Image (cartoon, coloured by chain):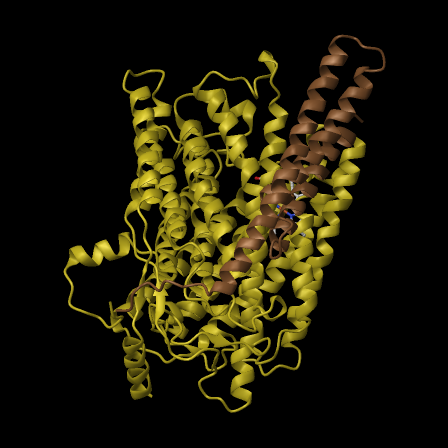
Amino acid sequence: MSSVAQKKGFGSWLWDWLTTVDHKKIGILYLLGGGFFFVLGGIEAMIIRIQLAVPNSDLISAGLFNQIITMHGTTMIFLAAMPILFGFMNAIMPLQIGARDVAFPFLNSLGLWMFIFGGLFLNISWFMGQAPDAGWTSYASLAITSEGHGVDFYAIGLQIAGGGSLIAGINFLVTIINMRAPGMTYMRMPLFTWTTFIASAMILFAFPPLTIGLFFLTFDRMFGANFFDHAMGGNTIIWEHIFWIFGHPEVYILILPAFGIFSEIFSIFSRKRLFGYTSMVFATVLIGFLGFMVWAHHMFTVGLGPTANAIFAVATMAIAVPTGVKIFNWLLTMWGGSIKVTTPMLYAIGFIPSFVMGGVTGVMQGAAPLDYQLHDTYFIVAHFHYVIVGGTVLGILAATHLYWPKMFGTMLNETLGKVTFWFFFIGFHMTFLIQHWLGFWGMPRRVFTYMDGQGWNSANLISSVGAVFMAIGVIVLLYNIIMTSVKNVPVANDPWGDGRTLEWAIQSPPLYYNFTQTPLVRGLDSVWIEKQEGNESGITPAVPVQDIHMPHGSIIPIFMTLGMFIAGFGAMFREETSWGLPLLVFGLAWTFVCMAIRSLKDDLGYYVPKEEILEDMKRERGRK
Amino acid sequence: MAEIEIYKKSPAEFDLGQRRARRSMRSQVIMFSLMIFLTLTSFMIVTASNAEVIGFSKYYVIPVIMLFAAVQVGLQLYYFMHMQEKGHGIAAMFMFTGALLAFLIVLTFVTIVWWN
Ligand code: HEM
Ligand SMILES: [Cu+2]
């Protein structure tokens, strides 16, 4: 039961990871899964850019191209960006609030496995030669007429993965509400915890519409319903509403945690308290709320009429205000700070101009009349890549360097980190800046090729070369990860030397029960405060050393998810095969049996005895 | 390895718990009868309306039933789901936020999206 490396067989090691309910291990698994899909989505992106590098390219067919862009978008948003963010939330947020785990460790594991099985389900479509091809937005008029099983994979795969996201969001909410250490008031929570909180609340309200939309789509395609079929009295526009009522909050779910990560980085490496903490918190809450009030800005050209367009245009532009507040707060955090340009800080500095550019083009598109020109051109592609790559992905890469030592107990190489940054950053701007002009010049979005002589050739080539730079950056990062893992030089509690929040006051990686004693929090940036007052450990314990209650691991989440996975195939083949319906019933029954087992079998967890904790503390003192 | 602790209540605590339970039981029974009363009334109003009793037009019946429904939801939440007790502030906040968002979205549809 001890955290010291023991000689274990491969089997028990694997079993340990498959059944784990430890938030740190689940965080690592999210990172692994999300990282895998990030590379997969990246390969798809490279194929797209190679296809578009020259005019009249016939490397891939139009149909295959549609499948690749659909899977690229879907993979990147649902299977790469979100899960990687969940990984960091899982690994770091409980440490930041002084908790021993999330509120529902079992559900945490269930959410992880639903993401993984949902992702696998989606990607199995490749092996059947029928990947989804109606765009990541899967507009109903395209989606219900799409041939083969492609869109079925989309609807069911996202249903499973989306359920996992909803579970994760609820879990984080309850954790933050209920499990903060004594003294950790809401207004003392680190910004990454705050953004996790708001992003989770947005998940809570945004994912149910997606669930419903996907069920409608599933019923339309597989069970003969007509929700979106106008010829049968349905309404195809309603899908767009449902999708964007989910979709716009979703983009803020992606960006808010990145904002949180950058807030931590700015104050750590400027060695200053975050400027305007209170306004940061309120800006986050406001963005979270306004994010639900602007969905129709994706539908200006649908023809909702001038009233709707005008109101949604104003609401959209209003979001720029709290976002601007944040930008100024970050700049003023750096102002007068003693700045140390480490790899994470480099990402943070690069993030500001990149994200601002994405925000500005967003406000441009928010002007409804202008959007009639910009809609469905490469300008849109440039906009959302500036916010998603320039915001979320830079945030993810920054967090990878910042939190790697905390999660794995060894430091990524700083020089290689900076090499990654420069390749990625230059490649990113090279790829997407020029696409604004491609949009102005009339190149439509989602085309598989274009004709010569329209003046688009060199811009497209530049864009493709930029993509190669980004790929090199990612490869250097992977090399860096492998090299540091092989060397495995252990680091101390606070390898950056300027940590301000609780996670930097415990071991890297933390003991499996995190805190030997629950900490007492005496202010914002509590570790910094303690160290200023001469308490080298950074923590004032709130309780004496005592037995710690911990949850048992469980294999049930994997089996539960397996049932849904099987049922998904059953639903898909119900009409054309005889085994479809029995498989559907079997899969659902399987899941219900797993749920029954979980409910009926009491699992009270176990206690880590005080002696073991004292032992760990003694060893820790010995290392110093 | 420590065992799972079992907490024994003192007689005073036990007594207090019982008194609390009794008080909560009384209010639950009262609210339950109120809810049954509201349900019966609703059915009666609708029956009257169907039998075309004068004064029971649908412009009267529908709003009244809606009002009763809203009251019932409130009673359900506050008495049977214990929202009136302490420590439910956050849950209430989330529920009201969700209700507000849903209301605003529906309002948008009926004012500026579908009928403009
Ligand atoms: C200042 C804030 C922002 C504003 C005003 C804004 C505005 C817009 C508008 C009006 C569109 C629709 C354009 C069209 O299709 O004609 C759009 C598209 C998009 N935005 Fe933003 N946006 C903002 C921030 C963000 C953020 C933070 C993200 C993600 C992290 C994001 C991701 C996207 C995506 C993915 C699309 C394209 C969706 C699609 O059609 O496939 N935006 N944005
Ligand atoms: Cu939007």
Q: Residue A139, located in which quarter of the rendered image? A: top right
Relative to A324, residue B42 above or below: above
What colour has chain B? brown
Q: Quadrant of ligand 1?
A: top right
Q: Tally the numbered discs.
A: 0
What percent of the width, then of the height, locates residue B67?
Answer: 75, 31
**Residue farthest along the top direction in this orientation:** B51
Residue in the image at 60% along x and 69% along y: A185
**Residue farthest along the right direction in this orientation:** B55
What percent of the width, then of the height, locates residue B30?
Answer: 65, 39
What colour has chain A? yellow
Relative to A159, residue B19 above or below: below
Is residue B5 visible in the rendered structure shown here? yes
Q: Looking at this view, is A467 or A302 the one in front?
A: A302
Residue in the image at 79% along x and 8% along y: B52
Q: Looking at this view, is A313 or A174 the one in front?
A: A174
Which image quadrant: the N terminus of chain A? Answer: bottom left
As drawn, is A586 to the left or to the right of A467? Answer: left
Is residue A455 visible in the rendered structure shown here? no
